[in-house]
Image: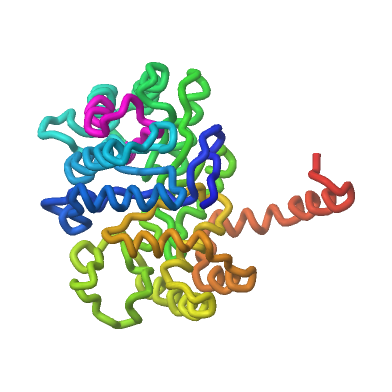
Amino acid sequence: MRHRPLGHTGLFVSELCLGTMTFGGSEGIWSKIGALQQPDAERLVGQALDAGINFIDTADVYAGGVSEQMTGQALKNLKVPRENVIVATKVFGQTGDGPNARGSSRSHILDGVKASLRRLQLDHIDLYQLHGFDPATPIEETLRALDQLVRHGQVRYVGVSNWAAWQIAKALGIAERLGLARFASLQAYYTVASRDLERELIPMLRSEGLGLMVWSPLAGGFLSGKYGRGQTQDPADGSRRVAFDFPPVDKDRAWNCIDVMRPIAQSHGVSVAQVALAWLLHQPQVTSIIVGAKRPDQLADNIAATQVALSAAELDQIDKVSRLPSEYPGWMFERQGEYRRQQITDAVRLHGGAAS
């Protein structure tokens, strides 16, 4: 298990992160995603830590807060030293009936962090993330509230999830201008069959030095490889897609990817899911992949993906079937920047180092 810095910070996190959305669901969509109880959750947490995973992600809305409770209790019952685990959680979603029990306002953030710390039984949160973009709250208000949490020691680092590139860039500019804590990471949806991040978000992350945490790396189980094109998924297999068909995926595109990954998986003696995860681990901008599980064998299969080394030829095969079609202004960037890129390449070759 390799560990990577989280963006431009000194915090090192494991390349896999244990997701806890399967913990404690008892009603609504959470029961369809996972209804693990405390002993099962502890078993998965212990298995992850034993494999070298030091990163756990949860959220205040998962199972109505029960996921946070179970995560904190698992760490306590397993007697995990606080410095040995990086705990990430999120704020933004609806946590009550009132009009202010949601969003990224100062009020909701300050209330949310206290509730999360209480449920997690921790004195600080390592990474506190905005779970979505709030169009009703000025970004400056949100950033000042997050900065207050960092200065008071309740939170070590801050990040976002499900934001657009322009929104993050705007927030980074405000944070720099006002001297506030800047975002360290983005948590976003990214799979071999859904590479939309590569248009705007990944170039922005690379430019601004943010880490990338990937959620739903198997597209809600669609890329598990358990089923072939046209086959019906069996609810008895525990596939989340049967009861909760999310996130959206271009199924024809995904099937084409699976068709290419299956023989690669067979040649390595691994599962299609492991190849899909390994592809993500080979992407330079990816910091950590969030993997959730209902059973120890599922988690073990995901962990084993860290040992899959794809060749350049195999990566090229997968890239050809999964790459995004060119769109404006991307194709114009390629056309207009070709000469200048060649100048840089020639300068590096001539001087044997980086171009000045």
List x then y, in percent, for residue 307. 53, 62
Front-most of residues 265 and 40: 40
**For residue 299, above or below residue 48:** below
List x then y, in percent, for residue 42. 27, 48
Q: Residue at x 18, y 50 (%)?
A: 37
| Residue 201 seen from this side | no
Q: Is residue 40 left or right of residue 331?
A: left
Q: Residue at x 55, y 54 (%)?
A: 329
Q: Is residue 75 left or right of residue 94?
A: right
List x then y, in percent, for residue 302. 41, 61
| Residue 101 seen from this side | yes
Is residue 128 highlighted in magenta?
Answer: yes
Is residue 259 highlighted in magenta?
Answer: no
Q: Quadrant of residue 310?
A: bottom right
**For residue 201, above or below residue 65:** below
Q: Residue at x 23, y 42 (%)?
A: 70
List x then y, in percent, for residue 338. 72, 56
Q: Is residue 256 left or right of residue 58?
A: right
Front-most of residues 257 and 281: 281
**For residue 117, above or below residue 325:** above
**For residue 19, above or below residue 125:** below
- Please report the bounds of the magenta region as a residue range: 113-133
Front-most of residues 260 and 347: 260
